[in-house]
Amino acid sequence: MVVDVSEKKAPESTGADSRYFGRLAEGVFEIPVCDSCSRWHFFPRVCCPFCGSEALHWAAPSGRGTVYSTTVVRRPDGGDYTVCLIDLQEGPRMMSRVVDMPPDAVRIGLPVQARIDTMQEGPLLVFVAEGGAA
Amino acid sequence: MSAAGRGSIAILGTALAGLGHAGGATEQEIIARASVQAVARSGLKMQDIDGIITSSLTSPWWVMRMAEYLGIRPRFSDSTMFGGSSFIADLKIAAMAIAAGECDNVLICYGSTPRSVPSSSRINQMRAELDPQPYEHPYKPFNPVSSYALAAARHMHQYGTTRRQLAEVAVAARQWAQLNPEAFSRGPLSVDDVLGAKMISDPLTVRDCCLVTDGAGAFVVTSAKRARDLHRQPAYVLGTGHAHWHRQISCMPDVTVTPAVDSGKAAFAQAGLTPSDIDVVQLYDAFTINPILFLEDLGFCKKGEGGAFIEGGRIGPGGDFPLNTNGGGLSFGHPGMYSIFLVIEAVTQLRREAGERQVAGADVALVHGNGGVLSSQATAILSNHL
């Protein structure tokens, strides 16, 4: 019996996590949208958390959002950084970081724009104040 | 009303062990010490325990390990981990198991030793890997503090809650601790001390955060009917409620509204009581924002008014709203999952055994546990009479 070694290859992942991070690595910010109830959701799942449907497609949100809450993680070495909750214009909320401005200056309500940064650990979706400096 | 309804079970003996620094004893050893005492104070022998509920922050095998350690062969056991709220959520599980005839006498126990055996960075890394959160961990929140800080910051923005009000929660906890010889932190603490302490994750300083101490607690529950024969002062469980809506702070729909809204409603409904019937309140104070959120969500005040509600010393000793009378997680102690100590302190108050910190006329107590990052909320209403 001839075994085709290609059959032994792992199938391409159909998972939401791998798709999200895979697209991010390609420089694209995409999240799932429900075909049944039309709502966007985050974090990406294989079923809609609002209606349970598995019928989803992926789409690029505008990248525009608002700071819902923010904290500054204080580091003994002085490398303080923000941890924020960002409400995307399309509805979903996500944890992220607002960069390119002093951590203390990040305020709730600040309009922000998404940007993909390349970190040592991989691509990271961060936000900057909309229109540049706050 | 189901058989597991109002007042169907009661708490018998309670015990604490290994508080503060366990002096080299292991988690299992301090839990065993508390358990042996709690069972003895229940008028029972360990062999009479036919149900056990316990859980661990690290071991998924915990109930099997503790039953093995204590020599219990349970007819009923449960080890569901709801974070720090577990041991109040367990009251509901125990009530259902006892009502269903699955067991008679349930030991609920917990302990850990994070002070004497601090988690190595390797163990912390393993915990993160065992509970992956790929949409939060890359942003390096200093959790759990940062998640609670996000809730506090939003509450301050939305309702005008102030850092001084947060600090008052810590100061009141310390004043209670000063009346409790078993509390870990009993030195003086002022609002300015809290505000001036090292900032961890804005707006929370280290004094807005609970302690990290060793400690174990245990108690036994049985049917209310059996309880009267076994114990001079059973503490009846009048109502319980448990709810969770999220695991990660980024998935919490409104960070100023916790699932305590649901757990509290369920507990009050089962007990047939309202907030004005409660004499003494024990709320899981992992961080100073927590009691403020829970007072609102449980209906003691309106949403957004929690900061003003706790002002002016009213939650401290001598105040008209005694809260966290053992000193709380902020000053009594906090070995990882704290809610077992809320239950034990409430029972101590209901039995008039709280010494200098005894609240006069404490006949009905509310205990409320929190787990995760405001994730799991469990409420119970206890009383010294049915």
Image (tube, helix red, strand yellow):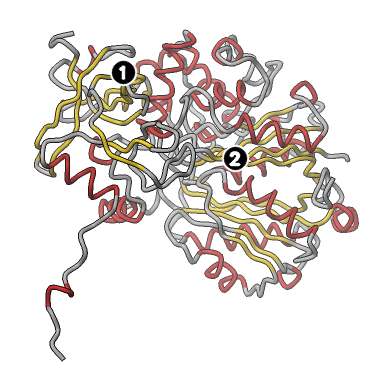
Pick the residue in front: B146 or A123: A123
**Residue appearing at x 15%, y 10% in the figure:** A131
Residue B52 lies, with reference to residue A69, above or below; the image says: below
- Outermost residue to the bottom: A1
Chain name for mark 1 = A
Q: Tell me the residue that label 1 is attached to.
A: A67
**Residue appearing at x 19%, y 13% in the figure:** A130
In percent of width and height, residue B242 lies at 63, 41
Q: Is residue B343 left or right of residue B276?
A: left
Residue B243 - label: 2
**Residue appearing at x 47%, y 8% in the figure:** B160
Pick the residue in front: B168 or B159: B159
Pick the residue in front: B199 or B373: B373
Q: Is residue B385 left or right of residue B154?
A: right
Q: Residues within 10 Å of mark 1 (few under 14, many from 20)?
A: many
Rendered image quadrant of residue A27? top left
Chain name for mark 2 = B
In percent of width and height, residue B131 lies at 36, 51
Rendered image quadrant of residue A65? top left
Label 1 to label 2: alpha-carbon separation: 28 Å
Residue B67 - label: none
Q: Residues within 10 Å of mark 2 (few under 14, many from 20)?
A: some
In percent of width and height, residue B289 lies at 49, 23
Amino acid type of the residue that numbered disc 2 sits on in the rendered structure: Ala
